[in-house]
Amino acid sequence: MLLVSNLARLPQNWVSKGGVCGQSIRCASVVCFLRYCFRRDSVFVINCDPALLLKLCALFAIFPFFRRPLVAVDLVLREPRGWTGWLRAAAKRMLLRRVDHFIHHFKDLEGYQQVYGIGPERSSFVFFKPNIRYEGEAGAIPEGDYVLCFGRSLRDFDTFFAAMETLPYPAAIPRPDFRALAEHGARFSRDLNSLPDNVQLLPDDGSEESQVRCLLGARLVVLPVLKTKMPSGASTALNSMLLGKCVIGSEVPAISDVFEHEVITVPPEDPQALAAAIDRAWKDDELRHRISEAGRRLALSLGGEPELYQRIIDDVVVWLTNANAPSLR
């Protein structure tokens, strides 16, 4: 079996958990993928690149004889806004019919199924990984001294600010990149001069080192997400867990459907509920330590990039051997 993928570091030679052997080759463009359309053992695996995936879907729709088994990994889609957004969503839905299998890092498919026609019959769940996997393994981890709101994807800073205005605890956010926040659908409507008095700005250049520094200084990490049926991403949660932080998150896809005892969840866009959860976790040492220890165990068990790639390979092989999967031609 040959996995043709845009994943840069997929093992060139691999063995699945079930003992199936195969190879992989990297392709970054449609032209490159075309070279492998007539290899009977090839499977196309597209990771987190909607544009490339949709181009291949269009190619298969126009020239069905080029078609190979097509797997989409970590496809990030947003809730459409306005009539133009719904038109684009309808076009994507038609093209995405050509995808044979989706590997998600979340379980709640309600939004994807309603808008894009991506349901459980074409989907599977694979745990993501901490992006700072090897940063949190050595030495004692400080508990920290502030409540940190971190991340960009659909992040609801307004609710965090409203909650912190009612609490006496020190809080922090990374110095915002408003352009990046807008691109990721975050809500941050306040001017920096009108933040709550107990919220400080932390230096952040967008690097992994900055993220680690911000997370290490936190006593609690809060991930408020806007009310949505679309996933927000779990990387910040897993990074926080790896560094032994107690995480509080919104009840939305990629948080409440993925984690059980590793996160304290609250309703989205509810400042009172968020404030109550922060207050309890700050005061209750047993609760805070129990949540952080459960999260750290999970994060450590997931490994890093090599372990994630192995999970993806295993999932593709299991799917292909399933009776409902298209056979390799």
Image (cartoon, rainbow, N blue to C red):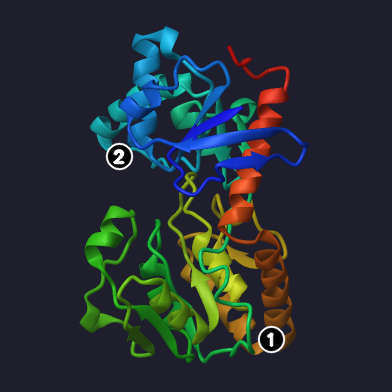
Horizontal side, residue 188 vs residue 16: left or right? left
Circle nearer the N terminus (1, 2): 2
Alpha carbon separation for disc pair 1 and 2: 41 Å
Q: Specify whether residue 125 is in view.
A: no
Farthest-out residue, right: 18
Helix, strand or loop at label 2? It is loop
Query: Which residue is under mark 1?
Result: 284
For disc 2, the marked residue is 81
Amino acid residing under circle 2: Arg
Percent position (x, y) of residue 187?
33, 61
Picture quarter with the C terminus: top right
Local packing at callout 1 (Cα closer than 10 Å; few below 14, some 14-19, many 20+) is few
Name the residue at 32% across, 35% down. Answer: 51
User: Around disc 2, counting alpha carbons within 10 Å, would you say few (fewer than 14), some (14 to 19), or many (20 or more)?
Assistant: few
The percent coordinates of residue 108 (x first, y second) are 59, 43
- Comparing 270 with 250, the one in front is 250
